Structures are given as structure tokens and as C-alpha cells.
Amino acid sequence: MPTPGPGNDGLRPGLSADQVTPGFLGFAMTAFMVIAVVLLMVSMTRRIRRVRYRAQFSTSEQDSQAVSGNRVVTGASEPPISGAVPHGGS
């Protein structure tokens, strides 16, 4: 095995450093990462829309019940106590 030196970059004879590319494996890994990020972004967008829709639906449902005189009591509708730590989580 040739030893590294001032004129030897560890490349095959006849190759220069600007002619070396990552090849198919580098392309495949980059393509995989791009596809994975795009799929994660699409999934995240769907989940955010779903949460917003549910919050909007819940708010409109509570408003309609308040107008009709019915009151729904849930633990989530009460304001949190300042300084309180929720149970069951860490």
C-alpha cells in the first residue's frame, strides 16, 4: 500500500481530487434522505391540520352548547393552576 506523501493523495494513478464523485451509493443515500424528509413533512402537515380541525370543532361545539344553555364539564376546559405539575408525566 502506498504511503501518503506530498504528491500522493491516496488516489489511483491518473485521477485528480476533482474527478472523484460519491457514485451511485452517495446518490442513493441522498435520494433516500430527500424522500424521507418529504414524507415526514407531508405526515406532519396532515397531523397539524387534524389537530387544528379538532380544536376548531371543539370550540364551535362548546359555543353552540353555551348558546343553547347546556354546559359541558370537562377537565380540559378548566384553566391550569399556575405552578402546578401535571400528574402522570415527566
Image (tube, helix red, strand yellow):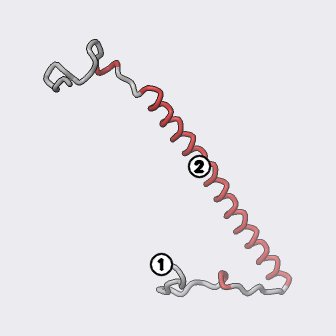
Q: Amino acid at mark 2?
A: Met
Which residue is at a point 64% across and 85% down the rendered structure image? 78
Q: Residue furthest right?
A: 68
- Using a 10 Å C-alpha cutoff, classify the residue at mark 2 as few (fewer than 14 neighbours), some (14 to 19) or many (20 or more): few
Identity of the residue furthest to the left in this view: 6
In this image, 72 relative to 19: left or right? right
Which one is in front, 21 or 78?
21
Residue 48: quarter of image: bottom right
Q: Nearer the viewer, residue 65 or 48?
A: 48
| Residue 88 sits in quarter | bottom right
Of the image marks 2 and 1, the number of the one nearer the N terminus: 2
Q: At x 82% / y 86%, what residue is drawn?
A: 70
Give the CA distance from mark 2 to mark 1. 28 Å
Q: Is residue 47 above or below residue 11?
A: below
Q: Quadrant of residue 16?
A: top left
Dot 2: what SS? helix
Going 16% across and 19% down the picture, which residue do you hit? 7
84 lies above or below 49: below
The residue where tag 2 is placed is 41
Q: Which quadrant of the rendered structure holds the N terminus? A: top left
- Element under disc 1: loop
- Of 70 and 41, nearer the camera is 41
Q: Residue 74 placed where, x, y %?
A: 70, 85
